[in-house]
Image (cartoon, rainbow, N blue to C red):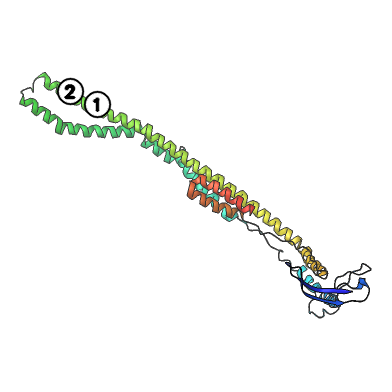
Amino acid sequence: MKVITKCVIDMKTLQVVEEESFRYKGPIAKCGPVGGGGSSSGQSDWPEYMKDFHTSLLDNAGGDLPLSTSMVDVMEVALAGSPWIGELPYDPDVELAAMLASVTNLQTLVTLLSSGTGLDALIIDVLSDARIDDAVDEYSLDLSAIVTADVLPRFEAGMRNINAVVSSAFVIGRANIEESRLREVSKFSANLHMKAFGDDALRLIALKLEGQKTASHMIIEANRLKIVAKKEETDTGHTIDEADATWDLNVFNHAGNLLASIGSGVMGSPKKSPLSSAIGGAMTGAAAGFMVGGPTGAVIGGAAGAAAAFLE
């Protein structure tokens, strides 16, 4: 029987380019390769050198020959040396306390602006009738000084030029000048009151609302980050506990790989995926979002960053 051990064929012409073979005489069941593991009885067998080497790797009781340490020795050391013993997850409480304190300080400033405090009382005092009346009085005095020093002298000089100082026109003219002065003072007072309790009050209300809006966004974001950070701390703690609890099983898994290697097979080794930091993603996203869209952008960016880190 001809046994071909190597054959090279030209795929275009289908001609045999190279061939290595030998003639075999004997039972067909014995014609297979030496290390194939198959036999007529269905039993598996392996080359002696593989069996000897495999035995030596496991030869803990026989002097660990030819190696100085067997798999059993390595396992005994590994079983007593779990790297997870005493490991703890990172505790973010210090950073969280600082972050929440900063948000609290912001809310305190907003409260000072939007409630009945000393600052709010000062703003009310600035917009009060008394201060507006004082401003009106100052304006009235300034206007009176201008009338006395400039308007009346010119009016009286003109009346003297036409010999009308003692006429009714002189008296009526003086009255008209005074009436104009009073009208200007009243107009100034009305405009000042309208501005103070109209435009200025509306701007103050808008400022208060914007401040509270910003503080509310930051409080929500800070609490969300706290939830994410504490959840991550808990999850990491569970991961460490699980790794410590399964350490011995994983050590035996390596022994299983060694046993399977003689049959050209390897057992699966568990892979531990690294724990992505959701809070880090949230902080990065929040910072980027704040630069683009202010507080609202920070909230959206933080949520997107946390989700991306979690999915990663």
Q: Nearer the viewer, residue 12 or 97?
A: 12
Quadrant, the C terminus = bottom right
User: Residue 175 shows which numbered tag?
Assistant: 2
For disc 1, the marked residue is 183
Q: Is residue 194 left or right of residue 24?
A: left
Q: Amino acid at mark 1?
A: Arg
Along the polypeptide, which appears first: circle 1 or circle 2?
2
Q: Is residue 172 visible?
A: yes
Q: Nearer the viewer, residue 246 or 37?
A: 37
Q: Amino acid at mark 2?
A: Ala
The percent position of residue 188, horizontal first and vertical second, equals 28, 31
Residue located farthest toward the front when viewing the structure as drawn: 13
| Mark 1 to mark 2 CA distance (whole Å) | 12 Å
- In the rendered image, which quarter is residue 195 located in? top left
Q: Is residue 254 left or right of residue 211?
A: right
Q: Nearer the viewer, residue 21 or 31?
A: 21
Q: Residue at x 18, y 23 (%)?
A: 176
**Label 2 packing within 10 angstroms: few (<14), some (14-19), many (20+):** few
User: Above or below — where is 55 with respect to 272?
Assistant: below
Q: Is residue 219 left or right of residue 274?
A: left
